Image (spheres, rainbow, N blue to C red):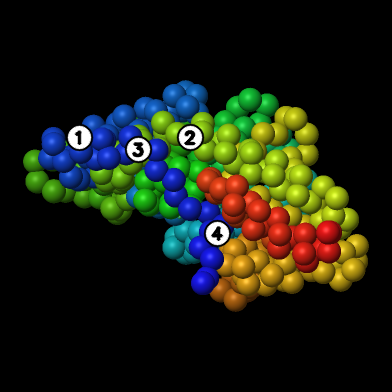
Amino acid sequence: MEKDKIWLLKPNMGGGELKYIQEAFDSNWIAPAGSNLAFFENELEDYLGCKQVVALNSGTAAIHLGLILLDVQLGDLVLCQSMTFSASANPIVYLGAVPVFIDSELDTYNLCPIALEEAIINCITSGKKPKAIIAVALYGVPYKIEEIRYLADKYDIPILEDSAEALGSSHKGKMCGTFGDLGVLSFNGSKMITTSGGGALIASSKMLKNKAIFLATQARDDAPHYQHSEIGYNYRMSNICAGIGRGQMEILNEHLQLKKAIHNFYLNLFKHIDGVSVFEVPNSNFSANYWLNTILINPLRTKGINREMLRLAFIKENIESRPLWKPLHLQPIFSKYTYFGKKNAESIFENGLCLPSGPIITENEKERIQLVVNELFNCR
Ligand SMILES: *Cc1c(COP(=O)(O)O)cnc(C)c1O
């Protein structure tokens, strides 16, 4: 009999979600409007500290609206981390703008400040200053916040912070999502919390928040009839989904603890295996949510065992694992765009593997994972 699948990530409901959905039904607010939305946004604002949050129907929509608010237009250049999910960059292309891809550095797997500055100087020299920097907190790890902010200020280019994977992560005690000129969260099924599908834009002023809500609800002018003087979008989160979000906020801290425990499990598991390293934050200024645990395998030190062999060994036992995000400049659809940097992102992609990260993994599942690892690497 086939064993139950151990998923890379799966949603985990806290129990409060149904109560808030019921409230939406009872008040008949089955729409992208209603009190769950305001409550969910307020809870996020409290959690993140003092920013303005707009709940939307996806993280991708949040990136799209964010770029619009940063005035990205046809033909503009947007700098974007190469090693990330395609959704970080797709909205650049929706707008007819042009992505410029940047390598990662090895401490955080995020934007390499050296490659970023090289790209900025190159763009400016060729007559076109980039309109925005998309900085990702990949796998919930904050990017080099100070270095990237320094460059953004030096060249006066705003940051759109893609913290889709980084709810609950922080840098020097300040929450991810709040470092950019605008920030993005995702509540897709696999993220730190889920609304079944959803996202949020984090803005720095009430004015920007109102503008984002205006654009996300079809850009309706103030008139008795429907009147439009701008192109609008249907991007607002539904009141039902916001109800799920309220329930999930009640267990966000629990998710953070569970993820941390899974991280410790992997640290222990690979402690004695030469050539395999579990990703850890560079220093105590960085706090990661460990949304997804990743390892790097150096086959020169594992007697030739590489990440693909481990992945296949996991599959045999019905355990899901996955290579890291394939750098976007290597993706067929994006390969025509310019890329700055060395081959860090490429080598992380070649040698890295994402491991099941819950948020709930049972003791029995941990044993199954442990068995595969120990057998392959021949420990006992
Ligand atoms: C999930 C994700 C997104 C997109 O969020 P959706 O809510 O799925 O649209 C964007 N960027 C990164 C890095 C992500 O992981």
According to the picture, the residue beneath numbered tag 1 turns out to be: 23
According to the picture, the residue beneath numbered tag 3 turns out to be: 15
Residue mark closest to the camera, 3 vs 1: 3
Asked if disc 2 and disc 4 are in contact, CB closer than 8 Å, the reply is no
Residue 154 figure quarter: top right
N-terminal of the pair, mark 4 or mark 3, is 4
In what quadrant of the picture does the C terminus appear? bottom right
Amino acid type of disc 2?
Leu
Q: Label 3, label 2: how many angstroms apart (C-alpha)?
A: 13 Å
226 shown above or below 22: below
- In the image, taking residue 370 as reference, residue 159 lies left or right, namely left
N-terminal of the pair, mark 1 or mark 2, is 1
Q: Label 3, label 1: how many angstroms apart (C-alpha)?
A: 14 Å
SS class of the residue under badge 1? helix
Amino acid type of disc 3?
Gly
45 shown above or below 7: above
How many residues crowd mark 4 within 10 Å: few (<14), some (14–19), many (20+)? many
Frontmost residue, 253 versus 288:
253
x and y percentages locating residue 67 in the rendered image: 47, 50
Q: Label 2, label 4: how many angstroms apart (C-alpha)?
A: 22 Å
Residue 284 figure quarter: top right
